[in-house]
Image (cartoon, grey):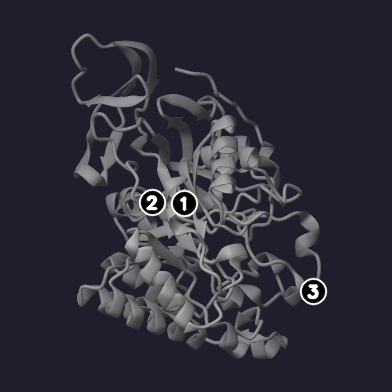
Amino acid sequence: MKGIRISGGRVVDPANGVDAHLDVYVAEGRIAALGAPPPGFRAEQEIDATGLVVCPGLVDLRAHCREPGQEHKATLASETRAAAAGGITTLCMPPDTDPVVDSAAVAALIRRRAERAGYARVVPLGALTRGLDGCRLSEMHALKSAGCAGVSNDFHPLESPLVLRRAMEYAATFDLTVFLMPQDPHLANEGCAHEGAVSTRLGLPGIPAAAETVAVATALALVEEIGVHVHFCLLSTARAAQMIARARHDGLPVTAAVSAHHLHLTELDVLDFDSRCHVLPPLRTQRDRNGLRHWLARGALDAVCSDHQPHEADAKLAPFSATAPGLSGLETLLPLTLRLVEDGVLDLPAAIARLTCNPARILGLAAGTLGPGQPADLCIFDPDAYWTLKAEGLYSQGKNTPFLDWELKGQVRYTLLEGRVVHALPAAAPESAAAETGQRQDAHEPA
């Protein structure tokens, strides 16, 4: 048996309760053993992980790769390469491509192109309604058979709560998870910032917190009646997170995630009309940010996602309200989550769980674990390395991030996908210099 030996690292595998210094053995694209080598194992390659953390490859619950249809913004190849640089081995992609993922053919196309790129696996969500039109239900059984992990209408509004109810009933028939963006379109009223003192001062149309809580309340009432599993993709208010905590206490089958940027930024970051901070849902108050951190620590919020939305430079050059919402987040997902450890919100195993086994469980995937026999998807990172985020150092085609020039802690050294090294940072290069100069090394060869 030939393979890879990863030695000397701190292995953190929350799915199996492992947090110890162990060697990891990889063979035939799968985890062969932890600790002692399996019988007959011979290492063809060795990775010295001394001083590094070895954990399952990260699973990102929400990442727009833009392809097909918006290749001028990004492609599956560029964004999965960026994912590998961020330690992410599995991406969940919303259905708002062009054409929309409302047929098995489009879902198969996305998976095939991602496999051809070879840096990370992409799991698409199917459209809840045909063409995301908000009224005609999609062929959910066909979408599930094509590999879709669930169904969603993303930010496209539904015609009425009755459509949502019928969609939930249909999804429940096939044991499909409904991924909801909780925002009432009438209350949001095409706003672009949190409705409050900052938006009033800047003259920006606001989105009240009630736009989110009303949508969450409606969905929870239907979940209680139907019993379908609903995942709330992005929560931005402390009140909505508290509602999810209550629903889970009552036994409702709901899960929820929060973006990494909502755990660090607030409405105050919009004060200079910084269009890089134009995101949906909008950045909320400091009280909301602290509340989201609280409920993440308590377990009401299952996962942290990137909500990756790459844009071309021109998309962020108009006046704030006219710019395209969204930021590029794949390569900052891990360090921003690790900052929560520095801030005392989570310990390291809990933080890694929010990026690995928890999102994998929501997607129903055999990922986010280092159990023997599981796919050898691994992230090996230096938890103490400081580096500065520079646009020229980003692999993503989108450079639209408000975290440029931030000093970040925690840098990915290696990423393995099914036993292949798909990203490797030169060990001899200083961390900050590698990030600032965009120095790169691709190791995309079979192990």
Residue 123 x, y percent position in the rendering = 48, 46
Residue 432 appearing in the image? no
Residue closer to the observer: 58 or 247? 247
Against 403, residue 421 (above or below) is above
Q: Which residue is mark 3?
A: 319
Q: Disc 3 marks which amino acid?
A: Pro
Against 176, residue 262 (above or below) is below
Residue closer to the observer: 202 or 135? 135
- Quadrant in which the N terminus appears: top left
Circle 3: element type: loop
Residue 47 x, y percent position in the rendering = 39, 21
Q: Disc 2 marks which amino acid?
A: Leu
Against 72, residue 165 (above or below) is below
Q: Are marks 1 and 2 in contact (CB under 8 Å)?
A: no
Q: Disc 1 marks which amino acid?
A: Ala
Q: Disc number at residue 179?
A: none
Q: Quadrant of residue 197?
A: bottom right
- First reached walking from the N terminus: tag 3 or tag 1: 1
The CA distance from mark 3 to mark 2 is 34 Å
Q: Which residue is mark 2?
A: 355
Circle 2: element type: loop
The CA distance from mark 3 to mark 1 is 42 Å
- First reached walking from the N terminus: tag 1 or tag 2: 1
**Label 3: few (<14), some (14–19) or many (≥20) C-alpha neighbours in 10 Å:** few
- First reached walking from the N terminus: tag 3 or tag 2: 3
Q: Which residue is mark 1?
A: 142
